[in-house]
Each structure stands twice: as structure tokens, then as C-alpha cells.
């Protein structure tokens, strides 16, 4: 039964790739980053036409999100992102990889930015090393959000001290979302 489900999953993924579409759904993990990286590279080899990336994610592993973000920026084809459901945490990092005019959202999508989370145990020096690293990551992510949204770094630092939720209209005003859409026909043609 599991083999049959995997086959069905691979078949619909293959169909999506033929339409130059990728779906990110659920937790951002290293395994997901590897899969999305491979899909982006495959689509780049298939041509320069734009790629559509649908995101519905609560976030996850910071570095996995960074991997996908960097790959979107690295490849030649334009990547159009469509937020659906919720786009939070590491999902925001991925979403913001697209150029501003290529960031779309469905009307009921929610967005959330915050500082990175970490859990550490061990000797005091090891805990301090990890805490220092989390502070560096927080600073880098805040700078990225500021640059990609047009918000001041001070505003982003204030907003990310805690979970900062935005509905789709607030996300548009913040500079995260470019356009709210309700129909597939509102997306740019591939």
C-alpha cells in the first residue's frame, strides 16, 4: 500500500514539474530543502520560463529555509511565489526570495515573522556558543526581512521580538506580499 501511495505521489509531482510548479507544504526540513533544490535545478535545465512556487508552511529548520531561499535567488528562471494557508518563520524566508513583484497571496493566507528559536543543553560554554549563533542568525534574518520588504531594520527588530502575525492585507502593507489574488488567471502567464 505504501509503495502504491509513493508511486501516486511521484506521478502528481511529475505532472506539477511539467507545468513548472512546485509545492512547499508543511514543515521546512533538510529533506524538503534537498527535494525543492533538485526540483528547481531540474526546472532550470528544462528552460528559462518562470517557475511557480506555492507555499503553505509553518516554518521549520532555519538553514533548510536558507537553502531554498538561496537556490531561488541562484537559478536563472524567475520564481513566482504564491502564499496559501499560512507562511511563517522559515517559510517567510523562502517567500521573500522572490522579487517583490513576484510575490502573490491567496486572500485567507496568514503570515508570521519572529526571531529564530533554539533549544540547547550542555555545558555553559556550549550554551553560550549556541546563544551567540542564534543572535547572529536573528540579525541576519532581520536584515533580510528589512531589505526584502522595505521596512526599517529597527521596525523589523521590534516586530520579530515575538511572533508577529499579519493577515494578507497587513502583509501587503508591510511589503511582504505584492498582490492578493483570488483566481489562477490573475497570475502572470508562464
Image: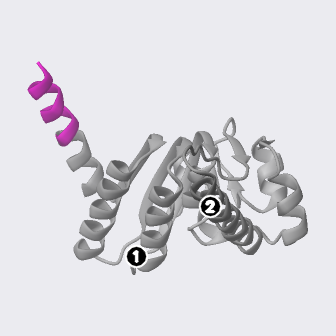
Tell me the quarter of the picture where residue 47 sits: bottom left
The reply to whether residue 32 is visible in this rendering is: yes
Label 2: element kind: strand
Q: Is residue 60 above or below residue 142?
A: above
**Residue at (64, 47) in percent of width and height:** 117
Instruction: State the quadrant of the N terminus.
Output: top left
Task: Give the percent coordinates (x, y) of residue 46.
Answer: 23, 72
Residue at x-position 22% and y-position 36%: 9
Q: Who's the residue at 56% across and 67% down the image?
A: 97
- The answer to whether any part of residue 19 appears in the image is no
Magenta-highlighted residues:
1-10
Which secondary structure is most common in the magenta stretch? helix
Q: Residue at x 82, y 51 (%)?
A: 161
| Residue 62 left/right relative to 37 | right
Image: 54 above or below 27: below
Q: Which residue is mark 2?
A: 103
Mark 1 — residue?
77
Proximity of marks 2 and 1: CB atoms separated by less than 8 Å: no
Is-magenta flag for residue 54? no
The way the protein has been coloured in the rendering is: one colour
Amino acid at each position: 500500500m505504501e509503495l502504491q501511495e509513493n508511486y501516486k505521489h511521484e506521478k502528481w509531482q511529475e505532472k506539477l514539474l511539467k507545468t513548472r510548479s512546485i509545492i512547499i507544504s508543511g514543515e521546512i526540513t533538510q529533506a524538503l530543502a534537498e527535494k525543492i533544490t533538485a526540483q528547481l535545478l531540474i526546472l532550470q535545465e528544462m528552460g528559462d520560463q518562470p517557475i511557480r512556487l506555492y507555499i503553505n508552511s509553518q516554518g521549520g529548520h532555519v538553514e533548510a529555509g536558507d537553502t531554498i531561499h538561496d537556490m531561488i535567488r541562484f537559478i536563472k528562471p524567475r520564481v513566482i511565489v504564491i502564499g496559501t494557508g499560512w507562511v511563517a518563520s522559515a517559510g517567510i524566508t523562502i517567500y521573500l526570495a522572490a522579487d517583490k513583484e513576484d510575490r502573490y497571496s491567496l486572500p485567507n493566507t496568514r503570515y508570521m515573522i519572529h526571531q529564530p528559536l533554539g533549544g540547547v543543553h550542555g555545558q555553559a560554554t556550549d550554551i553560550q556558543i549556541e546563544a551567540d549563533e542564534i543572535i547572529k542568525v536573528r540579525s541576519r534574518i532581520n536584515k533580510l526581512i528589512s531589505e526584502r520588504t522595505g521596512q526599517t531594520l529597527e521596525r523589523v527588530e521590534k516586530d520579530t521580538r515575538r511572533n508577529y502575525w499579519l493577515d494578507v492585507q497587513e502583509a501587503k502593507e508591510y511589503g511582504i506580499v505584492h498582490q492578493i489574488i483570488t483566481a489562477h488567471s490573475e497570475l502572470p502567464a508562464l
